[in-house]
Image (cartoon, rainbow, N blue to C red):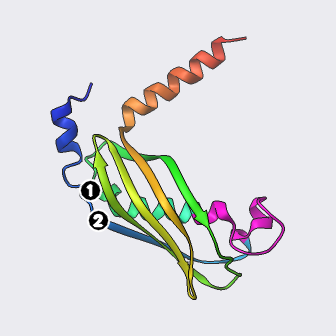
Amino acid sequence: MTSPESRRTLLDRIVPGLTGTAEIVVGPEHTAPFVGSGRIAVLATPVMINLIEAAALAAVEHLLPAGHQSLGIQLDISHTAATPIGLRVIATAEVSRVEARTITFRVTARDELETIGGGMHRRVVVSVSRFDERVQRKLRKNAADP
């Protein structure tokens, strides 16, 4: 079990103001019809969310100790403008708060012309081995239940 003292040192390199970005050029594979979230060939909301999560990872993942990673646990996102195929979209995530193992980000997504979305995203830092143990227990429990 991780003690409160080691948790503090676990995230001591993660501080408000850190930023990360991720970008794509919208292609047919990024559109709502392709991912099943609508019928108009514009950037799909799930793809924008994926880009936002990638920006959050870019901000902090490289600062985590070996054997740890962050997992998305909460999104409060708006998607307010459409982006057609061919435009570049850049997502930015800025650390706004760190509490225990939870990192909160302010996030935005912009295409080449305007802001298209944003909001708040939270991630929790976990030990990969301990997390995998819990997942494997869940699988075994499911296999044991008829």
Q: Quadrant of the C terminus?
A: top right
Mark 2 Cα within 10 Å, few/some/many (few <14, many 20+)?
some
Q: CA distance from mark 2 to mark 1?
A: 11 Å
x 35%, y 50%: residue: 103
Left or right? Give the position of 34 relative to 80: right
Q: Amino acid at mark 1?
A: Leu
Left or right? Give the position of 128 relative to 75: left
Camera-near label (2 vs 1) is 2
Q: Quadrant of the N terminus?
A: top left
x 19%, y 50%: residue: 12
Report which residue position mark 2 lands on.
18
| Camera-nearest residue between 106 and 29 | 106
Compared with 144, 119 (above or below) is below
Left or right? Give the position of 40 relative to 1: right
The label on residue 63 is 1
Q: Amino acid at mark 2?
A: Leu
Which residues fall within the magenta stretch? 29-48
Mark 1 Cα within 10 Å, few/some/many (few <14, many 20+)?
some
Compared with 88, 99 (above or below) is above
Residue 104 placed where, x, y %?
38, 53
Left or right? Give the position of 54 relative to 20: right
For the residues labelled 2 and 1, say whether their Cβ atoms are less than 8 Å apart: yes
The part of the image, by quadrant, that contains residue 24 is: bottom right
Counting residues from the start of the chain, the first of labels 2 and 1 encountered is 2
Residue 135 placed where, x, y %?
51, 28
**Residue placed furthest toward the bottom:** 113
Please give the count of numbered marks on the rendered protein: 2
x 42%, y 32%: residue: 131
**Residue placed furthest toward the right:** 39
